[in-house]
Image (cartoon, helix red, strand yellow):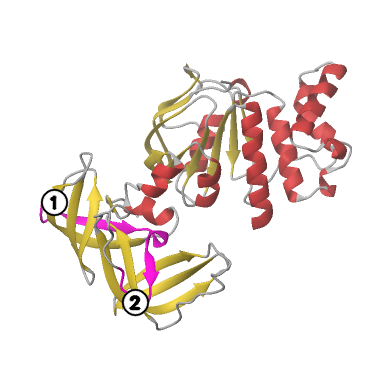
Amino acid sequence: MKGSDVVISHVSKTFGKFEVLKDVSLSIKKGEFFSLLGPSGCGKTTLLRIIAGFELPDSGEVTIEGINVLPLPPNKRFVNTVFQNYALFPHLSIFENVAFSLRLKKTPESELKDKVYKYLKLVELTEHAHKKPGMLSGGQKQRVAIARALINEPSVLLLDEPLSALDAKLRQQMLIELDAIHDKIGITFIYVTHDQQEALSVSDRIAVMNHGEVLQIGTPHEIYESPRTKFVAKFIGETNLFAGVVKASEPYTNGTRLLTIDVENLGLTKVTCDQDYTVGTKVTYTIRPEKIVISTTEPGMPASGKHINVVQGTVDEPIYSGFSTKYFVKLTSSLTFKVIKQHANYSDEGPAIKWQDKVWLSWSADDGYIVGESHD
């Protein structure tokens, strides 16, 4: 495995009276595609700049492959950064942009040429070598920036919102290409983004940040399916969030518990949980819209014996988007559910369920989740 381990230990940083990073600690594995995800101002770019050497923390330590790099200047840290604005030299050809750092090192011409074309081939820009940046598309410019960063053969590549300047379709294409480049070269990627779909698509693991703190670290599946805080549940994808009170707790399967919680305006709801809560504990309950089945007929209880929650409501707003329809279903005057129905077959020609239809919503107790509190 190429690349280096990166360990951030108790890093804090303030700008004036604003505390940008609050005692941040995390470990990034060698060769991992690791994303720092969070809204603007959460501290993710500052953390990246500290790793790169463009900022110094007020306290804490950053080690790369076991070496404390804080005393080292950026060019001695074996890291390179790809910025969102490309930072290409407009007067130089694509070849010379990629070759720039090698020329500073006085690399012999034959070796320089071989390496430049190696990395231009990696990003599929060989035939554009003699063009100027102004002749390329945004996605091509970003690939040039990636090749220029990789030609120094860093053990860690830092990517600061590298796709944010691209349109949505091109961003998706570049994301696939970026993941393929990572698979080919195998070094450590640390990727900063505010786009949860980007992070879920390419990351081995994700650190979700808010207000200078790391709220949760996990695989995309863990972050999405098992959010630890209310903020993570809301920030990653869409969800339904409700306040409730634990009314009963009983053993379930594999060491888990089956809770009965009383949700205001919803009533008693079953949810499985990997920890016990005492009766009377206030909790926050979440259920993803795509986990909910919507039907115009009342569902029966499954033969499997699973615990199913069933409620009735009225379609307040259906939003058809081709591959799916999102329904806003009003249960009471103050309680609305978001439900997403996928259209998997041609027979799903459109939303059979219409505005103001009476509908039944059902979901398994296994699909809901209890989340903790956080600073929103």
Circles 2 and 1, Cβ within 8 Å, touching? The answer is: no
Residue furthest front in the image: 303
Decide: is 312 above or below 93: below
Q: Does residue 298 belong to the magenta stretch?
A: yes
Coordinates of residue 180 in the picture (x, y in percent): 65, 36
Camera-side residue of 146 and 52: 146
Q: How many numbered discs sit on the rendered protein?
A: 2
Q: Earlier in the sequence, mark 2 or mark 1?
A: 1
Coordinates of residue 291 in the picture (x, y in percent): 38, 59
Q: Does residue 80 belong to the magenta stretch?
A: no
Residue 165 is at least partly visible in this image: no
- In the displayed structure image, the side of residue 118 where residue 109 appears, left or right: right
Which residue position is annotated with label 1? Answer: 249
Which residue position is annotated with label 2? Answer: 330
Name the amino acid, label 1.
Ser
Neighbour tally class for label 2: few under 14, some 14-19, many 20 plus, Cα within 10 Å: many
Give SS at disc 2.
strand
**Which of the image's four quarters has the C terminus?**
bottom left
Coordinates of residue 56 in the picture (x, y in percent): 49, 31
Name the amino acid, label 2.
Lys
Residue stretch rendered in magenta on the structure: 278-299
Camera-side residue of 307 and 50: 307
Q: Which circle marks residue 182 in the picture?
A: none
